[in-house]
Amino acid sequence: MTHPARHRRRPAARVAAAAAALALVAPLAACGSGGDGGTPTINLYYAPEQNLQKVVDTCNAEAGGRYKIAYRVLPRQADDQRVQMVRRLAARDTGMDVLGLDVTWTQEFASANWIREWTGQDKAEAEQGTLAGPLDTARYQGKLYAAPKHTNVQLLWYRSDLAQQPPKTWDEMISAAQQLKRDGKPYQVLTMGAQYEGLVVLYNTLAESAGGKILSDDGKRAVMDAGTVKALDQLRKLATSGVTSPSFSNATEDPVRLEFQSGAGAFQVNWPFVYPAMQEASPELAKTVKWARVPGIDADTPSRVTIGGINMAVSAYSTHPAESFEAARCIRDARNQRFSAVNDGVPPTIEKVYDDPEMDKAYPMKETILEELKEPAVRPLTPAYQSISTVMSAILSPPSQIRPEQTADELRDAISDALQSKGVLP
Amino acid sequence: MSTNVTPGGAKAAADEAGRAGRHAAVPAQRTGRRTAKAPLSENKRAERRLGWLLCAPAALVMVAVTAYPIIYSVWLSLQRFDLRFPDQREFVGLDNYATVLTNEFWWTAFGVTALITVVTVAVELVLGMGLALIMHRTLVGRGIVRTAALIPYGIVTVVAAFSWRYAWTPGTGYLANLFGEGAPLTERASSLAIIMLAEIWKTTPFMALLLMAGLALVPEDLLKAASTDGATAWQRFTKVMLPVMKPAILVALLFRTLDAFRVFDNIFVLTAGGNETSSVSMLAYNNLIRGLNLGIGSTMSVLIFLAVAVIAFVFVKLFGTAAPGSDDGERR
């Protein structure tokens, strides 16, 4: 390029640069003026849920201009959701107000001082009529840090044409499956055994059903008592009994559902989402499928089943806390929980919602769900849960190689390390 | 990936910058230079000061973007610092190093990283040399051959890794059932093989490019003389081409080794570290970003930094690899 050419271009370049600078600044200016004066915008960060926008619209209409909720959709994967929120909260981002937290994250966020305590009227409303299990997941050190929006619990789905009665215990289920195998019928016991949260959920269900404790009640110590050893033995038995699917050690929720739908399984332990999916994909099979409480360890003690779900929390860095609490309360109130249960299939946390006749159609299995929810198994309540879950799934995988006593010792050491921030995550 | 600079490219860029600088400086400083010829220490000092002043912005930027994060992570690695327990932050000395260096997960990951580094670099060297010879000797469609060979290197790693993942997943992929039933990405040995394959596929063209630059250094006369003396093709390759190319080969190996040691994206997408396929970078990410444990995570980052420094030291000091920008054969 020659010099004269450069000279000639300069004025044009300057104009362009000035225009670009203006274009960059203009939206910022617009933002600044709109933020404080008018209606505050409450940014709701929540996992994708098909009809949540309708709930948000309802709440916005009711707010009558006091605030306006904007639904910001988080990534689909739980891990990605957590990483996004954690990264922004660690940077004290004021752009997040109401957060949809997985039940296992509430203690972590509370301990890191990222979310606000629920007090006074807000607290009273969040606790009123809410099932005890989900409410436990929202507490940290005796204080309430979130309001449960929905919960979830796994059920046993079985083929009534292959088994007349649902098995009461895992051993009973395994021998029933072995008998079916000998008779040349579909026999598989299908559930999640891959190295991920799903395996920890399965183990937690077994451990709590056996009366075992993974953590001490204050959440500060690893326990791993006789009950948890028994659960390890049960998990190994299941994995080596020859009745699981060949891909058991790599199975996650949806592949398990598909395998059952393809007709290979006699029993499936999975979340309620499999029910509508099955109605749609294989209605013939669906007619023979019934549900029951997840089997227990021994016949006289009913099982305790791990609960999932989402809690609503308010960011510590929110600039509109009062409105945020109000918005969170609205999104999880009884009427909206019913709407979400019917339209999005997420089980409510407020007990009286289950009485609504509309629920019968969406949740024919609502009695069983409610029964399990009243005596639930909660995953270890500690801020270090994420680390504990990661090391547990690594040590438990593959389940066929568990050696109960030794694995329990390994788990105890790894969980202790994780609680003291000493653990290394795989 | 971003640190890959061909030695020729870096040198050319430096030369060009030098020339441009000189052109710009000459008219302005001509008078200054003339007077500087007199042995006036005052003037010399002023000039040196000016030199420092001119360097300062660049040096400050370097400190801000490189030195500060490194020093800060060393500082973090000496603390118990977990974002989830903000009240329990304390200075723990070298405890974190003891924790990491006695941990089984760390050494498994280290082994995986070392294996991937050694295997991929060795295979890439052989394949890259072959590809370089082909590209160097191609007479017809030289441009097309070179462009085609470079395509894998041009594709974004994460995107390529996703297509590898789908290819090896039963149901979506055409490669999954190549070796019988089953999901190859769910077992350790086959996952590692696939990760290495993806790495080799991606970076062989880059290796070939570096080696082709080395091939250009081999004088035709030397090859002709050797062949007149009766040397076979293999002898010409091992006795003439390889020794002349040695600096280029070592630079290529240095770059690829450093790069391979930091392997992350292929593993992240293909297995996410399942079945003990985590590399050290993956492990540092898991502990730092997902585990929120700044102490342990920073310790790992510092250890990775040290490992990379050792690799570079071995190459530069022991093998006499010329650092990019310096003349061939000159040691630094």
Image: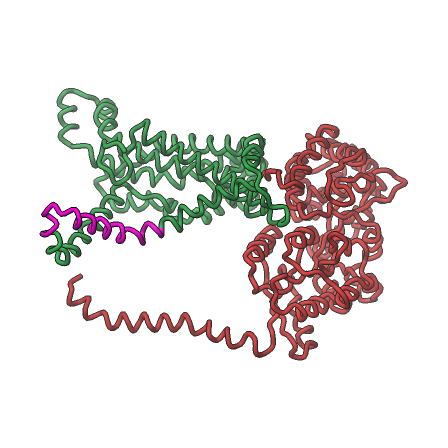
Q: Is residue B304 visible?
A: yes
Q: Which residues are magenta?
A: B35-61
The image shows residue A86, relative to residue B294, as above or below, that is: below
Chain A is which colour? red
Residue A317: image x %, image y %?
60, 62
The residue located at (64%, 79%) in the rendering is A65
Looking at the magenta stretch, what is its main secondary structure?
Answer: helix
Name the image quarter holding the N terminus of chain B: top left
> From where the camera sits, is residue B168 visible?
no
**Rendering coords of residue A315 (x, y %):** 63, 61
In the rendered structure, the answer to whether residue A166 lies left or right of residue A43 reads right
Residue A96's image quarter? bottom right
Position in image of residue A379 (x %, y %): 74, 46
Tell me: B296 left or right of B15: right
Palette colour of chain B = green
Q: Is residue A180 left or right of residue B276?
A: right
Location of residue B77 with respect to A111 vertically, above or below: above
Q: How many callouts does the rendering have? A: 0
Colour scheme: by chain
Where residue A58 appears, as percent x and y from the top left, is 69, 73
Q: Nearer the viewer, residue B81 or B103?
A: B81
The residue at the point 14 percent across, 58 percent down is B28
- Residue drawn at x 67%, y 41% as measured from the top left: A419
Q: Nearer the viewer, residue A152 or A44?
A: A44
Seen from the viewer's position, the closer of residues A197 and A276 is A197
Q: Is residue A103 left or right of residue B49?
A: right
Queried whether the magenta region covers residue B32, the answer comes back as: no
Residue farthest toward the right in the current orientation of the protein? A300
